[in-house]
Image: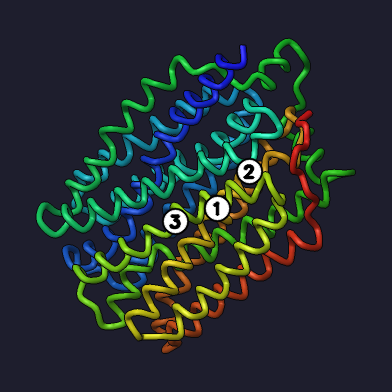
Amino acid sequence: MKNIKTISEKKLLGIAGLGWMFDAMDVGMLSFIIAALKIDWGLTPKEMGWIGSINSIGMAVGALLFGLMADKVGRKNVFIITLLLFSIGSGLSALTTSLAIFLILRFLIGMGLGGELPVASTLVAESVPAEKRGRVVVLLESFWAFGWLIAALISYFVIPKFGWQAALILGAIPALYAIYLRINLPDSPRYVTLQGKKKPSVLEGVKTLWSGEYLRPTVMLWILWFCVVFSYYGMFLWLPSVMIMKGFSMIKSFQYVLIMTLAQLPGYFTAAYFIEKIGRKFVLIVYLAGTAASAYFFGTTDTLWVLLTAGAFLSFFNLGAWGALYAYSPEQYPTSVRGTGTGMAASFGRVGGILGPLLVPYLSAQGYSIQVIFSIFCVSILVGAAAVFFLGRETKNLELN
């Protein structure tokens, strides 16, 4: 029985992780595609910002809608629907020549992506023992780094020679295979135990989040998600373009961002180690503080080796914090409202993902320096860390109910 459980956990992690990887490939390539579209379509900075923001609007809608659905129709069903929506949207976006159509498809892609991530972490969290849960969910999130690495490689080698359309097709086709794998995936054991029992209505579920013992964790998660998503999408979607603003060519910028991206993997793996050894709060607070410091130094220098070092640490700490965030969020709620609670927190966070990418071109147009802009992201991250410190509770080894 122990061996079966171990194989099951590995299979679950692999199947969920593949979808996560393809999602990351899309988001990772988007930052490079934005830089390429500026040249191909002659986009203004504000139009470039809207590509990132419309993606986050879709993610906000998807996280809310599919989070609610996950408590009604099951984690597995939503898991399949979201990746299907993402794959079709990504493939079709490679065929468009219009910014308006491209934005509509980015909204649909965002819906799939925004719904999948919190539901995937909920499914995995409910399917593994308490003593492994944090580590396994962070390892699930580590597939994001592999997706970003593949995205950086495709963007560096494919976009300059074959165009951004080829990059999008390369990301969409393999995702269809991940859908095939998910069809035979069992649903969360904890969700299955609710079958035949009366589930709370959508309104009852929302009321539960904002009343009694769940009010404090809900406030904490909403602040944390907003701050993390606002800073992440504001910084990482603009990394190639910021490097170009600092005087480097598009090819060199892609190369340097690829180097920075390599630091994501040790960020995840160290977070996966510390999250079970020391705890969720420690990882979130320390890794968010490291992210803030790295963001400050990245924004204040034009020296290449300092940029690369600060960018690498930015990737290391920020993605480690993301892993802890996805492990920590489902642990705040009972099974009956876990999808709703995690999805609504992620949805509110995506509002930050809308504002972050728009902030960079808007403030740049007003004459503000990259130093000032990245200082704003630095403060945002520190606010998120403070929310965890003052409002968060430690959930290491907590048995889910």
| Circle 2/circle 3 CB separation < 8 Å | no
| Coordinates of residue 173 in the picture (x, y in percent) | 25, 33
- Earlier residue among tags 1 and 3: 3
In the image, residue 361 above or below residue 94: below
Q: Which residue is mark 2?
A: 327
The answer to whether 19 appears left or right of 319 in the picture is left
The type of residue carrying mark 3 is Gln
Q: Which residue is mark 3?
A: 264
Q: Residues within 10 Å of mark 2 (few under 14, many from 20)?
A: many
The type of residue carrying mark 1 is Thr
Q: CA distance from mark 1 to mark 2?
A: 14 Å
Does the image show residue 65?
no
The type of residue carrying mark 2 is Ala
The residue nearer to you, when weighing 18 against 359, is 18
Q: Which residue is mark 1?
A: 270
The colour scheme applied to this rendered structure is rainbow
Does the image show residue 12?
yes
Q: Nearer the viewer, mark 2 or mark 3?
A: 3
Q: Quadrant of the C terminus?
A: top right
